[in-house]
Every structure is written in structure tokens, then in C-alpha cells.
Image (tube, rainbow, N blue to C red):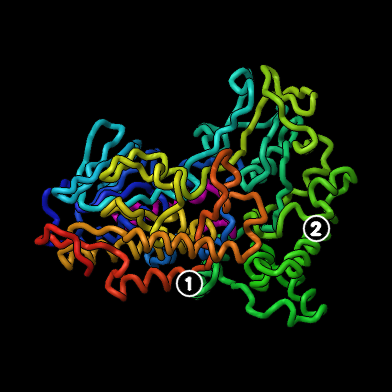
Amino acid sequence: MKPKNESNADLDVIVVGAGFSGMHILHEFLKRDYNVHLFDDGEGVGGTWDKNNYPGARVDSEVWIYQFTDPQIWQNYTFTEKFPTWRELKPYFNFVADQWGLRPHMTFKTRLEGASFDENECVWHAKFNDGVTRRARHLVLAMGSTTTPVMPKFAGIESFKGESYHSARWPKQEVSFSGKRVAVIGTGASGVQVIQEASKTADHLTVYQRTPNLALPMGQERYTRDEYAKMKPLIYPAMAYSRQTFGGFPYDLINRRWNDLNESERNQMMRQNWEQKGFRFWLGAPADLFFDEECNRAHYNFWRDETRKRIKKEHLIEILAPTEPPHPFGAKRPCLEQWYFDLYNQDNVDLIDTNTSQIERITENGIVAGAVEREFDCIVYATGFDNCTGAIGALDIRDGTGRTIGDVWDEKYLTYLGKMVPGFPNLLFTYALQSPSAFLNGPTAAELEGDWVVNVVEDMSAKGIRRYDAKPDAAHKWAERCNDVANMSLLPKAKSWYMGANVPGKRPEIQPFIGGQVAYRAALNEEIEMGYPNLVLERASSATAAAE
């Protein structure tokens, strides 16, 4: 039901971001008759799938769980691939927007620049780049984890006279690699995907690798309309089960201790997970993979030996699949590949190890690395994102003392449940710092976190709460819990975006909550069920804050 006391504001809720989280939240608020509007700086719906249209961009979750659980949507939409590309996801999001009637409640090409909280009226004044300041009781940031790209800072980068692109800022028009000398810098997920596509048409492709990607075989499948229709009865059970698993996938970590398995059982388990492809070898492994050095090394050795079978150029074997692991297996997020390791067998593909041939500068004609200049027609910078903190931390959103959220996080990574920052009342966010973020299947996280946000706002409205804020000690305890779980694991031994290591100068500390979906869901539910013991609440009729 629509809240009865949301006066002194243009809107009840402002939602920022039109991806899975933002669209789900908007839909849920509209069903409850809230005066809500969504803003996004992109050209249309889809969030990351509106902005990321580089060659090869595709999901790494099986399509039957990489969609909304609303039967109105999944029963009436047909995908053609098990792991679809952005070309299928853009029309999917447009279908959702039409089915849910969201378009009148969304504005695009409009960027939130900052906001300030009016303590007298308990409303946010949100400033947008269209010059308009809009007021709302609640401000919800659903901006995603992979939103703010890490831009390269190579010397001479502006001097290059050929084509150059960051994978996260790809032009909307088609870019062809055909007949060109192409360089790709970076071998993370976006790098692997671009490299695969460039290898098919480029006259010559040169890959600059710092750390080998321990990529897993995707196991792509394509479907006719009839084949997909026959699978639809299996979709809801897969969705339902994925709500109970560690990573939100239709399979789960195995809770048998590695030391309790004999050698035959271990090998059989690894072989079975490997042959089923996708993330099963990672998120269908024994839970000890993340904690036990022996278990982790066994999985790395298996991955290494299977991968080496596909590499025919002897001098590349140690660079792509080294004898000793570059980091614990799975401590950096693996990506899914289709022909990534095979493409290095082509005569038109070279691999440069930047550990031994460091990139020194970009020139008018190409790249100098290891004192050797190579000329290119096109350079692709696949240098990743400032995950978890980048998008929100860059906003000019200030508390009562003038500090931004970015200022707070510069001192300490502090949130409560990955949903709020103390000192910033009536502000909620999803898929960001100290939530599972990309450690959980995207749509699964969007609905889990989005439902909590909507339920909290609805609860506050029903109880006559005009101002709510996280208690500082609760946020410190949540940060401590996030770090304690991470420090028990092998993740801090890898220089990954999980630890903020992909952003120069960023403090090395765990970014997401890695305790898994079940534990996170329990923490969210407990806060509501206990009556918000970790929030400071102020009723509309009270001038002072009081705990509910």
C-alpha cells in the first residue's frame, strides 16, 4: 500500500540505475503504489548490458537463472543461448520494461551527481546533470558493481593515432577487427571475451597479459525456439534451488571435507565437475577449495593439466598455464571461455608477458613493451572496473558534517549489511561494498537485496518512521565480519578485485561479503525480524531519534 505520510517531497523514492536491481526495485515499489521514479545515465534499460556492448560480451551464468523469477517474464521470453550475449539481453530488458509498465517511471541520459539530506524535513535533495534537483524521502542506489571503469594511465596514451577503446566504454556503432593489427591489454573477463572475437578476424592479434586467467570451459549451447520451450518446465525448479545455494547457481558447494575423501573420490569429483563445465569446477567444488591449501592446489593442478592439453605452442604453456599457480585457484574470479586457449595456437596471435616485457609507453603508432615497439591499428584496454566502491564513492553525496561516502570509505570500508553507511539516513544501495555483489549470481542478488530495500522502506512508512540510519557500531561489526570471513579463506593471497588490488592506490581489503547467499539472507532477514535493532529510528512525531 502507498505510504500515508510521505509529504514534503516530490517523490517517495528515487531509484538510480536501470539494471536488474533497479528495475526490480522500481517494479516492487510501483506494485505498492509508491510515487517512485528511476534515473539512469545510459541510453536505455539494462544497466551493465546497456553500457557493455564490446565484442563477445556475454553472461557467465546459465540463462535459466540469469533472468527475473517473475513467471510473467520467463514464461514468455525465449533465449537462443545457454550463455547469451548483450545482443539478446538488451531486448530482454526492453521486454521486461514493457511487460511491467516501467517506461513512464524511468528517465535516461540523466546522471545523479550528488545529494544532500535535509534534516528538518528528512528528505534527500538529489542533483542531476540536467540541472534539476529532485526531492525524495528515500534514495536508493542500484548502480551495480561493474560500473566505474579503471582507465589506463600509460605514458603517451593520448598520442596514439589509431583506434582505441576501453571495453567498458565501447561505441554503440559496430567496430570491426577485420584486417587490422589489434592489441588487447588485459586478460580479465572482458579481455578474454574481446580476445576471442578479435582472434577470428584480426590480421594480427597481440595480447598483453600480466596474470594468466584461470578460465573455465563455458560449455555453450544454442537452442531453437522449440528446444527452449521444452526446457521451460525446468526453469522454475532451477530458479528455486538457486535461492538456496552459496553462489546463487543451480548447483552448490560440496560440504564433504577434502581430507575425508580418498584419492579416487577426489579425482572423480573434479572430473565430473570439469566435464559439466561452467562454474561447477569452482562453485560446485568442495567448500574446502576456499580454505584448504591442499584442496586448492589439487584443483589448480587439474585445471593446469587439462588446459595445457589445448596449448600447442611450447613457449606459451608456462605463460598461460604455469607449473606453479599464480594465486590460489578461484581466489580471483574465473571467467568462462569458449576457444580462448585454442586461439593462441593460431599463427596470427602473439602473447606478451608484461611481467618480463613491461609496457613502457604508448606511441603514435603502437605500444613499447620490453624496449620493443609493436605497431597497431587498434588498441583495446580491458583494464576492468573499480568494483564495489567506485560508482557510489564517486558521487557527491554528503552527510551532516560534509563528508561524502567516498571520504568515509577512504578511511574505512564501512557499511551495515552492504546496504547503508552510518551518517547517511534514508539511503539504501544494492550490489555494492560488503554485499555479496559479483560473488552471487546477478539476478539472484538483485531480487534478494532489492526485496530487502523495498521491505525496509515499506516498514518505515507503515511505522511512521521518517528517518532511519545505521548505528556506527553495527557497521563496524559488519565490516569486521566481512574481513573475518575473508581472512579465514585463501582470497587475500590473490591480487584480485575482490581485494581491491586491480585499482592502483586502493586499500587492499575484501570488497564483497563472501560468506555466501544463505548467510547473507539470514543476516538481512534477522534485522527486519528483530525490529531493526541496528538502526536509529526517528518517528514523524518525534524530534529525537529513538530505537524502535
Residue at image position (17%, 68%) is 463
Query: Which region shows up in magenta?
Result: 79-101
Question: Foreground: 103 or 133?
Answer: 133
Residue 457 lies, with reference to residue 350, above or below; the image says below
Are discs 1 and 2 less than 8 Å apart at CB?
no
Residue 358 tag number? none
Residue 93, image x and y in percent?
42, 51
Question: Foreground: 166 or 292?
Answer: 292
Q: Which residue is mark 2?
A: 304
| Mark 2 crowd level (few <14, some 14–19, many ≥20, 10 Å Cα) | many
Residue 186, image x and y in percent?
66, 40
Q: Which residue is mark 1?
A: 519
Question: Foreground: 136 or 481?
Answer: 481
Residue 418 lies, with reference to residue 343, above or below; the image says below
**Tag 2: residue type?**
Arg
| Mark 1 crowd level (few <14, some 14–19, many ≥20, 10 Å Cα) | few
Q: Main secondary structure of the magenta part?
A: helix
> Residue at the right extreme?
314
